[in-house]
Amino acid sequence: DLSVLREHREVWSTTTKESKSLLKSSGGSTTLPSSSKEQNLLVGYKYSTGSTHNLGLSTTIVGGTVLIIFVTVWISSLVSPALLYLSIHHQQGYLAAAIIFATTCAYLPWEKGTVSKYATAVIRCNPLYYKNCTSLFQTASSLPYEPENPRTKNKTKPNFYAVHPHGAFCLGWSILFSSPKMTSVRFCFSPALYMSPFFRLWSRLCGNPGRADKPSMVKYMKRKENVALPPGGFEEATLTSKHHDRVYIKKRVGFVKLALQHGYDIVPVYCFGENATYSNVQGAWKLRLKMNSFGIPAILTFGAWFLPLLPKRSKYGLYVVCGDALKLPTIENPTREEVKVWHDKYMAALVKVFEDHKCDAYGEEEGKTKKLELW
């Protein structure tokens, strides 16, 4: 969208000599081959900033500014009732009017237009803050189901994107939320967060948000929308560690049941480098996870030394991988055993995504030592 993003590019990777020669003969074009046999040779779509080292300090500042806005909106939304009360109590009329106006806009129905177009262009600058940032859709099945898109014309079922890890502020999630390839996906946020006016308004301007409660999820899935959810929730955020890759998934089976009931494929998504963006105090897991069960965040985190709200610019950057879609049957009333079978298959698919890409994300030597912890 912007000239500074010119390093973003499409790369259809290949795994056989036949497919490599096919791309060579086409001059590296990303146009899909016509035959189904040739189409099966294409194994991934890559959207990357490459290294931002040569783009200069101003580019980093632009990306950092966008991230600060994102995090500030996130936090201020949760305390917006208190802000409104204080502004009225201290007779700050302009501030109170601004909060009321933003709240009204957040809840009124409206169509996206010029303001939304520019807001989306701005939010898509956030990858420029990191040393490098890559989104990888491993196969055509990883892309959202869109009947009019030739790359997904062979798909018959929508995708359920299960995004890990949650991290402190879901930065990998935000990369996907603002991705041009994910505009048809309904990103489901915590009901408390989505109901807060500032965040609701921001997310409606920049993407396709929704609520992560069961009635709303069922409504979206009955309409056969592609949906995205971070299943690990507050618990996965609490467990964040810069030294360990952790996901909270063993007890999270509800999304698998919904996918079985409504005829969805599940795409396991892992964001390498998410855990390195913020430091988090470790320990006291039993108490902190218990707090999470009551909907209370229990993360004690800080980012860059000069501005703790800003994430650290780790050497890894962010490497977001959308794996192969796990193809599920449609079972209107799945048994507990059937849900467990497919939940186990999902966990295995998530681990496979991690193992297949950890060396690309962390480097060959360090990647070999990394293991994904399932909590």
Image: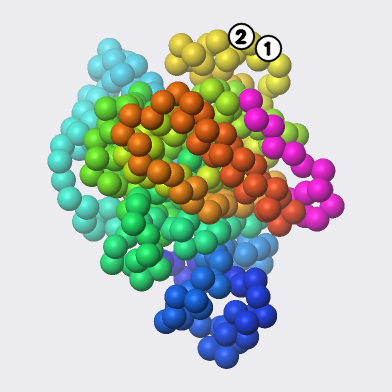
Residue 137 place in picture, x, y as percent: 52, 58
Direction bottom: furthest residue: 25
Q: Is residue 357 left or right of residue 162?
A: right
Q: Secondary structure at mark 2?
A: helix
Q: Is residue 373 magenta?
A: yes
Residue name at image x 46 percent, y 49 percent: 327
Residue 312 place in picture, x, y as percent: 65, 41
Question: What residue sits right under mark 2 in the picture?
Answer: 287
Q: Nearer the viewer, residue 121 or 176?
A: 176
**Vertical arrangement, residue 150 with respect to residue 317, above or below:** below
Residue 232 place in picture, x, y as percent: 52, 29
Disc 1 to disc 2, how far (Cα)?
6 Å
Residue type beneath disc 2: Leu
Q: Is residue 312 magenta?
A: no
Residue type beneath disc 1: Ala
Residue name at image x 53 percent, y 45 percent: 268
Query: How was the colour assigned to the protein in this rendering?
Result: rainbow
Q: Nearer the viewer, residue 205 or 68?
A: 205
Q: Is residue 194 left or right of residue 129?
A: left
Q: Which mark is residue 221?
A: none
Query: Is the Cβ of the residue at disc 1 closer than 8 Å to that at disc 2?
Result: yes
**Vertical arrangement, residue 373 with respect to residue 33, above or below:** above
**Vertical arrangement, residue 295 with respect to residue 106, above or below:** above
Question: What residue sits right under mark 1 in the picture?
Answer: 284
Residue 107 place in picture, x, y as percent: 20, 34
Q: Secondary structure at mark 1?
A: loop
Residue 219: quarter of image? top left
The magenta region covers: 361-375
Residue 156: quarter of image? bottom left
Quadrant where the image shows the N terminus: bottom left
Residue 180: quarter of image? bottom left
